[in-house]
Amino acid sequence: MEIVFFIGNMSHSGGTERVLSVIANGLSERGYRVSIMSLWGTGKTFFSLDEEVKVFWAEEEAPKAGIIRKLKQLNAFLGKKKPDFLVDVDIILVFYSFFLKRLNPKVHWISWEHFNYHYHFKRNHSLRAVARRLVSRFSDQLIVLSEEDKGYYQQNLNLKCRITRIYNPNPYGDGEPEEAKEPVIFAAGRLTGVKGFDLLMKSWKMLEDKYPEWKVLVAGEGEDRYILEEQKKAAGLKNFHFIGNVSDIGHYYNISEIFVLSSRDEGFGMVLLEAMDFSLPAVSYSCKAGPGEIVIDGENGYLVEPGNVEMFAQKLELLMKDEELRRRMGRNAKESTKRFDREQILDDWEGVLGSMMTMRRERTDEYSGDSGQ
């Protein structure tokens, strides 16, 4: 079967692009013909792709194309590929795929959402509400990242399409080399308000003087870098560091003792899953919508009421001062990630793809039988 994944910008270094690279490579290894159609981008992917996975860069073909010309470009690419499936990697792409589906009626159209239903976007928030309604009515299949988020869609929209929860896969698995641990609390994510690093600094302010041997490292870049650096300076924090984008995040998972997720919102919490696979206990806010399905409170980490910086600091301190607790929760964290194994998630994807093809054949057979009577 031929699959075309449609994404905004495959050259980005975010979690969405990372997950797509894992799924695209995995399905390619299983014999699917996989292409990626990138609306924008530099012509180079941040995450490696198998040789068989080809990327079509629309912006390179026509750098200043308007919407109509882009639609013609994308439709020409689909016409050449004749895919069985068109998979939007972000629900906002409905404003292209709605028309592409009509121009290519035989394609199965899947919308794969990477933000939770209640996620509030600074820009185009109302437009995304329209996108959700279009997808719910006109797409063939909606894929979301958590059972919690699936419930939000079922409660708030009159779904005409099928909806399935498929977790994001753990991109690591066994075999990562071990390194010596350091008194490091690690966090990673885009430096923007939704990731809550301002909240993390408030919690760390309560602990820094008591534990001078410990430090917090935050990997990532973003539009709020300057604001966060100024907040850090104003708080007088000496052992809290923004280290920028890192090429080997596995190294930081390896050397750290604790992982923290201070987000106000999450689609899933990919870095949380990755860190726990490295046997890191986690302290996370129980924000919408993914952390509650990854962290089991008191077993492999702690879930904290969103925005409660005092409780966040208390849970963090419990782990900082108790090595035995860190090790026990770390072992539990590693064990708990097995249900997010890449092969299991690929099985889930194949299940959805296969069932859609089966339904199409059954409808065709039914129609053919009726016409012959």
Image (cartoon, rainbow, N blue to C red):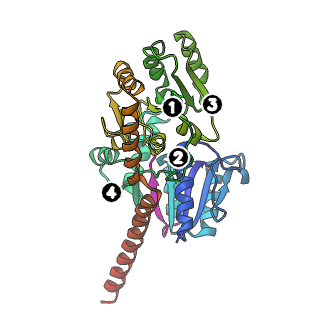
Closest to the observer, 153 or 167 = 167
Q: Secondary structure at mark 1?
A: strand
Instruction: Specify the amino acid type for callout 4.
Output: Lys
Q: Residues within 10 Å of mark 2 (few under 14, many from 20)?
A: many
Q: Earlier in the sequence, mark 3 or mark 1?
A: 1
Decide: marks 2, 4 in contact (CB < 8 A)? no
Q: Residues within 10 Å of mark 4 (few under 14, many from 20)?
A: some
Q: Nearer the viewer, mark 2 or mark 1?
A: 1
Q: CA distance from mark 4 to mark 3?
A: 43 Å
Q: Does the magenta segment cover residue 108? A: yes
Q: Is residue 96 left or right of residue 292?
A: right
Decide: marks 3, 2 in contact (CB < 8 A)? no
Q: Does the magenta segment cover residue 91? A: no
Q: Residue at x 63, y 30 (%)?
A: 244
Residue 215 horizontal/vertical position (percent): 53, 23
Q: Nearer the viewer, mark 4 or mark 3?
A: 3
Residue 253 horizontal/vertical position (percent): 53, 38
Instruction: Specify the amino acid type for callout 3.
Output: Gly
Compared with 104, 123 (above or below) is above
The magenta stretch is 104-114
Q: Nearer the viewer, mark 4 or mark 1?
A: 1
Residue located beneath label 4 in the image: 160
Decide: marks 2, 1 in contact (CB < 8 A)? no
Q: CA distance from mark 3 to mark 1?
A: 11 Å
Q: Residue at x 31, y 84 (%)?
A: 370
Q: Earlier in the sequence, mark 2 or mark 4?
A: 2
Q: Earlier in the sequence, mark 4 or mark 1?
A: 4
Residue located beneath label 2 in the image: 16
Q: CA distance from mark 2 to mark 1?
A: 18 Å
